[in-house]
Amino acid sequence: MRTALLTDGTLIHADDYNESQHFNILCLDKSCRAPLIFVPKSEKASSHFKTIGKNSDSKHSAACGFYQPLDIVESIEKVAEYQNDILKATTIKKTIISLNMRRLDPEHVPTATEREQPENEQESDNIKTKEKSENPGSISSLKSVVKLMVQYEPDLLSTIFFNIGSGRKVPLSNMILSQERAHQLLWADEVIREVGYFVYGRISEIKRREKVMYISLEKVNDIPFTIVIFEKHFQFFKVPEDKLKDKDVLIYGILRKNDYQDRNTTEIVIKSDKYIEFLKRKKKED
């Protein structure tokens, strides 16, 4: 981990750690607060903090975001937990990643620049989030979002802002949401109009009508959430229904309200199967 907590409540980045000034350092996770040690930068690794481990009090708790590798949903949940505190810390540098999902749209007409650039060169396989001197990484697919969330630790992810264009930079935890939080933000009128959001959930039911297809997610706290695909986009959605049901997914699309029969339902409108990415979740222990 590269961010830790000092005993006075201040967050500190490993690059800013001073052994003569900073003494007791703790894990930033509220469920943990394990004592940490500082590891200086080497040829193989950046400076970082770590626990001492076996036969000591310096061990992460089982609920800590650094106890073991996280799956994507666990990572999203921990970033949502950490990001407010990390972004309030003036000493922690922000990481900017450009978000450009236009190529998902089957109706998008590429610009001359986009046509000249091969699709496999649109984004770097190695999202650049390490040093301030590096150019921001770029994301243009759901696969890259998933890769980002599972490859990096939650404290680093909590420094990330997505550049969504027109100078707008939004914290990662405000763009990648649980279906419950997406619902709350939408109905509180706190989402950005005509901007796509990433929402995760588990598919429970598929209904195909003549003009529209509804893919319902399992309710969370009795909140209905539905993926919507209109008839004109059926040709771009090729995933068989039996491959969708009971699957964990990340969806990208525009959020919209539906208050039919006075029941506040949140919908996310998509145009093709590129707007859905299947997720690998850890098996729950019995």
Image (cartoon, grey):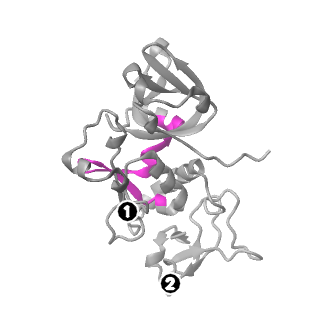
The answer to which of 236 and 168 lies nearer the viewer is 236
Q: As shown in the figure, which amino acid type bears the numbered disc 2?
A: Ser
Quadrant including the C terminus: top right
Residue identifier under label 1: 94
Q: Quadrant of the N terminus?
A: bottom right
Which class describes the residues within 10 Å of circle 2: few (<14), some (14-19), or many (20+)?
A: few
Q: Is residue 48 visible?
A: yes
Q: Position of residue 29 (x, y in %)?
A: 59, 61
Decide which of 253, 114 is in the foreground and name it. Answer: 114
Which numbered disc covers residue 165? none
Label 2 and label 1: CA atoms lie apart by 23 Å
Circles 2 and 1, Cβ within 8 Å, touching? The answer is no
Q: Residues within 10 Å of mark 1 (few under 14, many from 20)?
A: some
- Residue placed most toward the observer, 86 or 73: 73
Establish if 186 lies above or below 212.
below
Please state the extent of the stretch shown in magenta in the rendering: 157-182
Does residue 110 lie above or below 27 as drawn?
A: above
Question: Outermost residue toward the bottom?
Answer: 20
Q: Position of residue 215 (x, y in %)?
A: 53, 26
Q: Earlier in the sequence, mark 2 or mark 1?
A: 2
Q: Quadrant of residue 67?
A: bottom right
Decide whether residue 280 is among the magenta residues: no
Amino acid type shown at disc 1: Lys
Q: Which residue is mark 2?
A: 42
Indicate the position of residue 39 as horizontal and vertical percent values. Answer: 55, 81
In the image: residue 242, left or right of residue 48: right
Q: Is residue 169 magenta?
A: yes
Can you say whether 214 is above or below 38 in the image?
above
